[in-house]
DNA sequence: TATAAAAGTTAGGTTAATCTAACAAATTTA
DNA sequence: TAAATTTGTTAGATTAACCTAACTTTTATA
């Protein structure tokens, strides 16, 4: 049985790997995402390697073994199912779910997750638009295009957020944005990369940082 | 914030205290109920005393402070609400709920528990007949009379079980017993204290140990 | 390509929660 | 009440997960 901490390392690794396209990650990067020091990650890496959950050589890049991937995906699945549950059933807002799901994702019970999945009618996306891995560990979609990449003058659809922090999510709401909104990119400022966008007939100005955290479909 | 372990110590202590009538407990007793060694309990007791959660002097008995009681009751409340949820909503059987609730009771989120309580329509008893403390930490009933204490020839009602282990609970089902059943005590063997009982017109023989784990109302 | 910067590792330490073995105090019982 | 038993404590170790400070390797850049 994996510890709470080991599960967090594997999940963090999976998320980096999914983001990185290169299918690998580094020590510092992982340390950053877990808010611990690189030395700590180094220790854990040795342990995870010993358990055959990661592939890793001194000074080399880190990848997940098949076994490691399986565990990581299961944690991600639980996290996103719980977020969906909290949002759909318990009236949590999308900026409140993550914190609690961070705890719930570590509950060990196959039956619990099966029932949760069934109760929610096998949802495919969580409240942030992220795909929920199915029982067999398959994840469908990976969004890559962000609002910042959209050509000026065209319209796109917001399908997910990259940053899941409550401060960002609350900001998104404040700007009048939400999942499935149609967004038209009016213009981009050369000097500071500010974007003017139009949502539901209302214009707003958003920063590059903001736009890079909104995933869209053409 | 209390650790997972501290919460378990406080809950175990509360349960002992509620059982003991004397409102206090001892080191070995607590060690037994937590499946750790007395030396370990001793260490933890010093820490909990330092945090003003227990009253305790060297070689003396242990009681909960008001603050300790508050925390312990909250954990018990969460445990029993989760058991009820698993039983009522997720189709768990009464011998499956405890193990998972043992994990869920440590999730920290006031909103989560409020919503859980509301969703279940403010239940008063868990699937084992144990009373669920309300939001203000008040517990209503304490069952004391067991099936073994019932006078021969009289009829009583099963209201709760003392032992929550799945092996016992499965045994209870096998004997044909369940909460709210009317039980008539037919006879008690002098030599080995075996009881003959009648439930729904069917006679069964149960041991003293068994009978002492069934709480009844006259 | 030499050096500076970034990335990664090692050594040595801390804290929480556990243990065993030896001991001390309190309680029971003969 | 003295001895035996039970109960509780202490000292010293271990393990997981973290840290800082110093070091090494790799990568980027002048
Ligand atoms: Mn999340
Ligand atoms: Mn987590
Ligand atoms: Mn229980
Ligand atoms: Mn517990």
Image (cartoon, coloured by chain):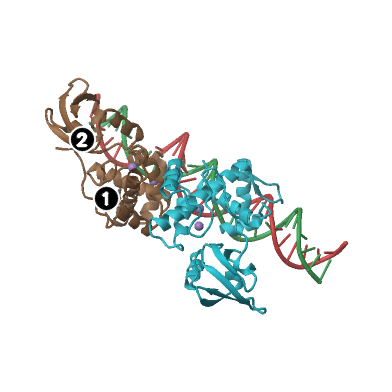
Chain colours: A cyan, B brown, C red, D green
Query: What element does badge 1 sit on?
Result: loop
Residue on which disc 1 sits:
B123
Q: Residues within 10 Å of mark 2 (few under 14, many from 20)?
A: some
- Whether residue B61 is visible here, answered yes or no, is no
Write the residue at 45% across / 55% down.
A84
Residue on which disc 2 sits:
B181
- Vertical position of residue D11 compared to residue A195: above or below: above
Q: CA distance from mark 1 to mark 2?
A: 20 Å
Q: Are marks 1 and 2 on the same chain?
A: yes
* Chain ID, mark 1: B
Query: Of C24 and A49, which appears nearest the observer?
Result: A49
The quarter of the rendered structure image containing the N terminus of chain B is bottom left
Residue A192 occupies quadrant? bottom right
**x, y (%) of residue B102?**
38, 44
Residue D3 occupies quadrant? top left
**x, y (%) of residue B87?**
33, 43
Query: Of B135 and A16, which appears nearest the observer?
Result: A16
Q: Residues within 10 Å of mark 1 (few under 14, many from 20)?
A: some
Ligand 3: quadrant of the figure: top left
Q: Which mark is residue B26?
A: none
Query: What element does badge 2 sit on?
Result: loop
- Whether residue A118 is visible here, answered yes or no, is yes
Query: Of A211 and B166, which appears nearest the observer?
Result: A211
Q: Is residue A85 left or right of residue A183?
A: left
The quarter of the rendered structure image containing the C terminus of chain B is top left
> Which is more N-terminal, label 2 or label 1?
1
Write the residue at 50% across / 48% down.
A4
**Mark 1 Cβ and ligand 3 under 8 Å apart:** no
**x, y (%) of residue B47?**
40, 52
Q: Are marks 1 and 2 in contact (CB under 8 Å)?
A: no
**x, y (%) of residue C6?**
70, 63
Q: Is residue B96 left or right of residue A173?
A: left
């Amino acid at each position: 049985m994996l510890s709470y901490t080991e599960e967090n390392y594997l999940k963090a690794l999976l998320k980096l790997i999914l983001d990185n396209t290169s299918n690998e990650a580094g020590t510092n990067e992982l340390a950053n995402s877990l808010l611990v020091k690189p030395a700590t990650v180094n220790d854990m890496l040795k342990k995870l390697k010993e358990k055959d959950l990661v592939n890793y050589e001194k000074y080399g890049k880190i990848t997940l073994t098949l076994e490691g991937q399986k565990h990581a995906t299961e944690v991600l699945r639980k996290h996103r199912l719980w977020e969906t549950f909290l949002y759909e059933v318990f009236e949590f807002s999308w900026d409140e779910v993550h914190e609690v799901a961070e705890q719930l994702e570590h509950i060990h019970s196959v039956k619990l997750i099966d029932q949760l999945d069934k109760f929610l009618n096998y949802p495919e996306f969580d409240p942030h638009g992220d795909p929920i891995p199915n029982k067999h560990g398959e994840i469908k979609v990976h969004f890559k295009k962000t609002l910042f990449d959209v050509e000026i003058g065209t319209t796109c659809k917001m399908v997910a957020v990259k940053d899941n922090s409550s401060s960002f999510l609350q900001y998104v709401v404040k700007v009048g944005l939400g999942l499935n909104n149609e967004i038209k990119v009016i213009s981009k400022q050369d000097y500071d990369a500010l974007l003017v966008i139009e949502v539901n007939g209302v214009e707003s100005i958003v920063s590059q940082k903001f736009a890079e955290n909104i995933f869209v479909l053409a």
